[in-house]
Amino acid sequence: MLKVSNLRKEYDAVVAVDGVSLEVQRGELFGLLGPNGAGKTTTIRTVLNIIQPDSGSITFDDKPFTPAMWNIIGYLPEERGLYRKSKIINTILYFASLKGVPEKEAKPLAYQWMERFGLKDSGNRKVEELSKGNQQKIQLIISILHRPQLLILDEPFSGLDPVNQILLKDILLEFRKQNVAIVFSTHQMEQVEKMCDNICLINKGKPVLSGALSDVKKKYGTNSIKLEYEGDGTFLKSLPFVRRADVYQNYAELELTDIQKSGEILSKLDNKLNLRKFEVVEPSLNSIFINVVGVPAEAEKPVVQTPITAPINADLVSKDSRVKMALYTVVGAVLLTLVFAVMALMDSEFSWKTPGTIAFIALASLYGYYKKRKEVIRELELKREVTKP
């Protein structure tokens, strides 16, 4: 069992994860949900000890995570982590070796999984030759080939077409039957609704909703009706007794203030829509998600803001060895110019040719100095951006 208690991770003035707690049993599919920037990926990386938490405890089977436990964990990151120039089979075998699976055992397993994902004859192709969806399949194979006991997947359905999404769903359900604890984060609410036993919804780093999916739905009542129709359903938002309406092209989900008023709502649809389906339902997870998280303010009213960042420390730039060398070159060129200028003035056959040349070199070196400073400042700015949460 994975147990996370009061997890917290802070970057400077930004609290990325604040008091997140969750428990995932063996043989359970657990959904970690939240809007963009909510702290899902930071939570996952902290659980895996990729990022050190500021406080909180993380255990698996009542034991703290240690390097010896890495071989029982499977992790699929959201970002691509494959060597693009490497052959597919070599890539899979390399990652299998990192998990302690010898090549003699890993190779047949690799081809079995490749065949299941429709890549049986692609072993000698380079990773860069694959589509985004097929690269995702390779990453999935890497995360499950060593038969992990804890499987953590960040956006596993990304890039997969509907057929391969079903295939992945079947594979995850097979792992659940094998008593594997599975955590996955996704924006695809319908997948969570079909597969997950328990969920945790976090927003702005804080847990706002958690528990069994059935209990979560009961908490939000059954004051919802689902419509399938032909026609323009825009007017549904303005009907009486409608608290909230999610209206799409030929489908709508309405949350009513009183479910007893559903008959009156139905009567108001006459001659406006060609109704195919009308039923009282529990609110969908997508509806609950929107209700809890809400619509981001920037989505309602776009605001263009100029980022305010502290300037790069000038002393830090000046201490850079490249900047120092460029400055020494300028000083040397200036001194040489002065020396040759004095010598030229003392010479009876006065000529500015030599000091003029040196002066030109001094100006060029001065330009090089300022250019080098800009390069160093830019590098420091990029480094600061990379280290931001």
Image (cartoon, rainbow, N blue to C red):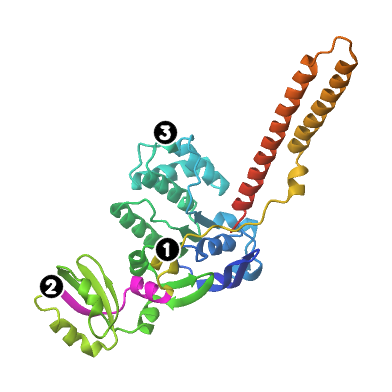
What residue is shown with label 3? Answer: 124
Q: Which of 154 and 260 is in front in this view?
A: 260
Residue 31 appears in the figure? no
Q: Residue 343 carries which label?
A: none
Q: Please provide the residue range marked out in magenta.
A: 276-292
Q: Residue 302 carries which label?
A: 1
What residue is at 78 percent from the left and 35 percent from the top? 327
Which amino acid, mark 2?
Leu
Please, what secondary structure does the residue beneath circle 1 have? loop
**Going by the image, does 280 lie left or right of 298?**
left
**Between disc 2 and disc 1, whose residue precedes?**
2
**Viewer-nearest of discs 3 and 1:** 1
- The answer to which image quadrant residue 195 occupies is bottom left
What residue is shown with label 2? Answer: 273
**Alpha carbon distance from label 2 to label 3:** 55 Å
Please, what secondary structure does the residue beneath circle 2 have? loop
